[in-house]
Image: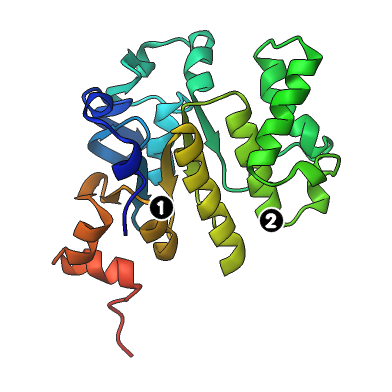
Amino acid sequence: MQTASSEILTTSETEQPFIELRGVCKRFGKQEILRGIDLSLYHGETLVIIGPSGEGKTVMMKHIIGLIRPDEGDVFVDGIKVNGLREREMAPIRQKVSMLFQNAALFDSMTVEDNVAFPLIEAGVKDKNEIKQRVREALEVVDLQEHMKKLPVNLSGGMRKRAGIARAIVGRSQCILYDEPTASLDPVGSDVIDQMILRMQRRFKVTSIVVTHDMKSLFKIADRVAMLRRGVIRFLGTPDELRQCQDKEIQDFIEGRSNITG
C-alpha cells in the first residue's frame, strides 16, 4: 500500500514538526495516565493512535488543543508552546487544530448548515456570503450538500460524522484530531469516513491524528502508527513495520486475540 504521505510530504515539510509532545505526563488523582510521551507529527501526515481502552489516547489528543494541560512536559503546535498559553490565547491554535469528537458533538437544534457555519461565526466572520460559500464548499467535500437543511436527528450516524468533519474543515484547519471516527458504523459507513480522511489529506494537505480500534481503517489511512500502552509509546512506525513487529502483545492487539483460555 502506498501511503498518502509518500505523495505529499517533502523534505522541507518534515524538517520541523507541526505538533510535538515532549515528556508529557498526566495524572488524575493517584492514577498515572501519561508517563512521559514524546511524539512528533509532521505537516500532511496521518498518524493513527491505537492501544487498549482507558490507556489515555483521547487524553493525549486533548492536550494538543489545550483542553487538558500536562502536569509535566510541553506541547507545541506549529512551534508555539500550547501549555504556556492562557485560555483566551488558545483561539489561534484552535483555528489551526480542530477536534472531531466521537459523537460529532453537533448542536441538535441547528441544521447541518448552521452547525457547519458555527465556527466561522465564533471566529468573527461577518460576511454572510462568505460564510454561505465556505459552508457549501465544506459540505461538498463530505458529500452532504443535499442535506444541509436537515437537523442532526434526521441524519445517519455516518452522515453526522461527515457533518462533524465539514465543521472541522470549514475554518480551514491545518490539522484535524479524530476520536474513534468509525465507531458504531457499519463497514460501508466506516469506509466512507476513511475516504473522507484521505480526501482531506490529498486535497488540502490536512494533518490528521486518528484514535481508533478499527484495524482495517488503520491500514487504509495511516502513514505512521503509535501504540499507547501503560502511559508510554510502546510502538511507533509505519503500518508495514507494525505488521512485521515481533512483539506478541502488539500482535495480539492488532489481531484481536485475548489471552483468556476456556
Q: Which mark is residue 221?
A: 1
- Direction from residue 60 to residue 117 in the image, left or right: right
Residue 167 position, x and y percent, is 65, 33
For the C terminus, the image quarter is bottom left
Marks 1 and 2, how far apart in space?
A: 20 Å
- Mark 2, residues whose alpha carbon is within 10 Å: few (<14), some, or many (≥20)? some
Q: Looking at the image, can residue 184 be seen?
A: no
Residue 205 position, x and y percent, is 43, 33
Q: Which mark is residue 145?
A: none
Residue 88 position, x and y percent, is 53, 9
- How many labels, in total? 2
Above or below residue 245? Residue 233 is above
The structure residue drawn at horizontal position 27% and vertical position 57%, both measured from the top left corner, is: 239
Residue with the most extreme left position? 246
Q: Give the residue pinned by disc 2.
A: 157
Above or below residue 136? Residue 252 is below
Residue 7 position, x and y percent, is 33, 42
- Mark 1, residues whose alpha carbon is within 10 Å: few (<14), some, or many (≥20)? many
* Between marks 1 and 2 in the image, the one whose residue lies nearer the viewer: 1
Assign a secondary structure to mark 2: helix
The structure residue drawn at horizontal position 60% and vertical position 40%, both measured from the top left corner, is: 165
For the N terminus, the image quarter is bottom left
Q: Amino acid at mark 2?
A: Gly
Q: Amino acid at mark 1?
A: Ile
Q: Looking at the image, can residue 259 be seen?
A: yes
Quadrant location of residue 16? top left
Residue with the most extreme bottom position? 262
